[in-house]
């Protein structure tokens, strides 16, 4: 599993030559400048191989079989207070990718504080809650690892 930013989607073709069979966690789609369609065109492999992050729960848009697989991993996330796994749209930025071949996941931040910072003048890296960042990073990276290890149900 590797984390590759979405803002330089054309570089994903070169990266795929080096790591053709690994899952890639792709942050940076949407407001950060990345384009989900370009990421897929340049970065997917024969199994899909992409987890595109749209934004403390995780929202999925996937087939029923893959959602059941994801729910079976819930106990692995609970010690880290990641307890909400629900069906949803996974984020407007990546919704064009929603089909039976892809599993889309969006991180659901704590809604009580989300708009205190998000898209405001104080939305700066130094204002990030370190623990929230660690939990979000852990959640998405773990999800990529599990799909990399066990695969997507087609």
Image (tube, helix red, strand yellow):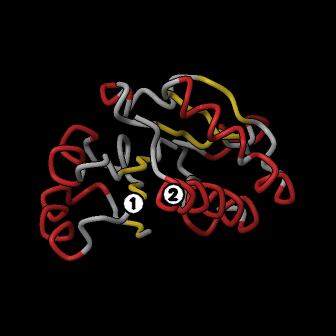
Q: In this figure, what is the number of numbered marks?
A: 2
Residue 72 quadrant:
top right
Q: In this view, does 97 lie to the left or right of 125?
A: left
**Residue at (75, 41) in percent of width and height:** 110
**Residue at (52, 55) in percent of width and height:** 150
Q: Front-most of 126 and 142?
A: 142
**Residue at (35, 25) in percent of width and height:** 99
Q: In this view, does 67 lie to the left or right of 23?
A: right
Which of the two labelled residues, at mark 2 and mark 1, occupies the earlier sequence position?
Answer: 1
Label 1 neighbourhood size at 10 Å, few (<14), some (14-19), many (20+)? Answer: many
Residue 64 higher or lower than 39, as above or below: above
The residues bearing labels 2 and 1 have C-alpha atoms spaced at a distance of: 6 Å
Give the image location of residue 6, x and y in percent. Answer: 30, 55
Give the image location of residue 34, x and y in percent. Answer: 28, 48
Q: Front-most of 77 and 4?
A: 77
Disc 1 element = loop
Residue linked to disc 1? 23
Residue linked to disc 2? 144
Label 2 neighbourhood size at 10 Å, few (<14), some (14-19), many (20+)? Answer: many
Q: For the residues labelled 2 and 1, say whether their Cβ atoms are less than 8 Å apart.
A: yes
């Amino acid at each position: 599993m590797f984390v590759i930013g979405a803002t330089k989607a054309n570089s994903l073709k070169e990266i795929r030559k080096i790591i053709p069979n690994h899952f890639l966690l792709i942050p940076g789609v949407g407001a950060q400048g990345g384009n989900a369609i370009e990421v897929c065109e340049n970065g997917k492999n024969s199994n899909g191989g992409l987890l595109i992050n749209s934004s403390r729960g995780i929202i999925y848009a996937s087939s029923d079989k893959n959602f059941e697989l994801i729910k079976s991993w819930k106990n692995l996330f609970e010690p880290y207070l990641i307890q909400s796994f629900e069906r949803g749209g996974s984020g407007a930025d990546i919704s064009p990718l929603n089909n039976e071949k892809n599993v889309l996941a969006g991180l659901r931040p704590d809604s009580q504080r989300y708009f205190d910072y998000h898209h405001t003048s104080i939305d700066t890296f130094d204002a990030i809650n370190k623990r929230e960042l660690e939990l979000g990073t852990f959640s998405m990276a773990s999800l990529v690892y599990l799909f990399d290890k066990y695969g997507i149900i087609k």
